[in-house]
Amino acid sequence: MNTQTVAILASLMAAACSSDERARVPSSTSSESASEQATNEGEAPPLEERFADARRALVDHLRGQGIQDERVLNAIAAVLTPRTQELVRVRRIDADRVERETLGRVQFVPLVGAEGWTDEGAVATPPRERAPLREDAPDAGALGRLIAERAERVEDIERVDLGPLLERIGDAKVVLIGEASHGTSEFYRMRARITRALIQQKGFTVVGIEGDWPDVSVLDRRVRGRDPIELREGAFTRFPTWMWRNRETLRFLQWLAAENEGRDENARVSLHGLDVYGLHNAIGLVLDYLEEQDPDAARAARTRYGCFSPWETDPAVYGRIAMRSEAHRCEDAAVAQLRDLVERRVEGMVGDGDSYMDAERAATVVKNAERYYRVMYYGGSESWNLRDRHMEETLEAVRAHRGPDARAVVWAHNSHIGNAAATEMGVRGEINIGQLARERHGRGAYLIGFGTHRGTVAAASGWDAPMQRMTVDEINTGEDGRYRRHRVLTR
């Protein structure tokens, strides 16, 4: 890093966190609403926003100096990340369930001295050894041996006996199947094999995937023989495109369409996107539905959604602008449109039930995506938690739509389908679909994870970068049984 860059970094840090700003931090905590109130009263923007501005300016400068490695840029930008935490209220509902409520981000005054930070902001003492998640938690070596003992090795995907697995699944209402990467053929093929068995032998009628609702609706209509629809943007064109545009997914869709041909219409297996992305196409789904049902309502919706027009195809820009100015927020418009759609259902003005479901869930995507793109700039767990809550709520909405006894399979990354409460994610205040499903269904939610420690993977070196075939170094264990971090090598 040259001296000019160092000087700019120092000046940005000084501008972002001046001594005057530190003096204004309350002695206990400052909530998000208090920061917004201070901003509205004409004071300086919250410290968090000033850090965000400084980070963006620094990264832009470094790119102008020819530094393009995203890992380097992210590491440098981390220097300008304020020490914020999230305040969470946890209430026990009964002996087996708890309810978590996020109260917002807070900023605590640091201690100075042996147990806190130095005047310069560095940690005065080495960090303590991380405590186990539970008092009875095994050490890392024991945990690795436990996984090795319990994991089931699959040598031949098409010939492996699924009988014992199906027996363990039993009468589970939801089966969540994960993957250690979004670019491993074997994971997709094994997941499809298990799903076919669940459909044919266990009566599952819903498949929910980590994909956008509008895009997956195109596929659902094809596999169930429904009328096709056109999207504003092509389906599955958002990065990473190979996540669902691959041969393994195509083969499963072909099988599912053939399977559905022999079923009554109400017994056909449906396919749904659970994710919160796809704002532009979601708006299109709502408008197209209303255009057929009620042109006057469509005109009103078009006016409301006009708030998004400048940023529909790049909602991340909307989030950055809305974070700075209340005047540019589209929250009220998105909420009002969803409320109108729900009122249509109450009044019986929905027409075709499946088409209404498409429109209602698309309107929910718009509402939740609006908030998601606003909070993602603050960092922390709020955007992650909003996304996974949306996915789990979408799953349950689909199950309710298909009938009270509908059973569902979920395809998503391991980080979404494992129980976050049992991992470091829970320590960081993050939740996921797996945890929410366990809290809702108990043992009626069955979680399956896929992993490997060698081979190749389809991946990219950065966001929006082209797909590459990468080789994963084998993971080795030391004498203490701890797994060593592996590297991914471009080939």
Image (tube, grey):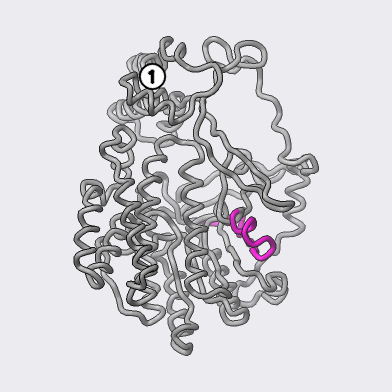
Residue depicted at 66% across the width and 48% down the height:
98
* Start-end of magenta stretch: 436-456
Residue depicted at 48% across the width and 41% down the height:
382
Q: Nearer the viewer, residue 10 or 81?
A: 81
Number of other residues with Cα within 10 Å of mark 1, as a class: few under 14, some 14 to 19, many 20 or more: many
Examine the rendered structure and indicate whether residue 122 appears above or below residue 67: above
Q: Nearer the viewer, residue 449 or 374?
A: 374
Residue depicted at 52% across the width and 69% down the height:
399
* Residue 291: quarter of image: bottom left
As drawn, is 329 to the left or to the right of 484?
Answer: left
Q: Position of residue 83 (x, y in %)?
A: 51, 25
As drawn, is 60 to the left or to the right of 196?
Answer: left
Q: Position of residue 6 (x, y in %)?
A: 38, 16
Examine the rendered structure and indicate whether residue 305 appears above or below residue 26: below
> Residue 192 colored magenta?
no
**In the displayed image of the protein, which residue is found farthest to the front?**
347
Q: Position of residue 169 (x, y in %)?
A: 68, 70
Examine the rendered structure and indicate whether residue 121 appears above or below residue 260: above
As drawn, is 476 to the left or to the right of 260?
Answer: right
Q: Position of residue 122 (x, y in %)?
A: 55, 16
* Residue 91: quarter of image: top right
* SS under mark 1: helix
> Residue 450 colored magenta?
yes
User: What's the amino acid at mark 1?
Assistant: Ala
Task: Say which residue label 1 marks.
Answer: 16
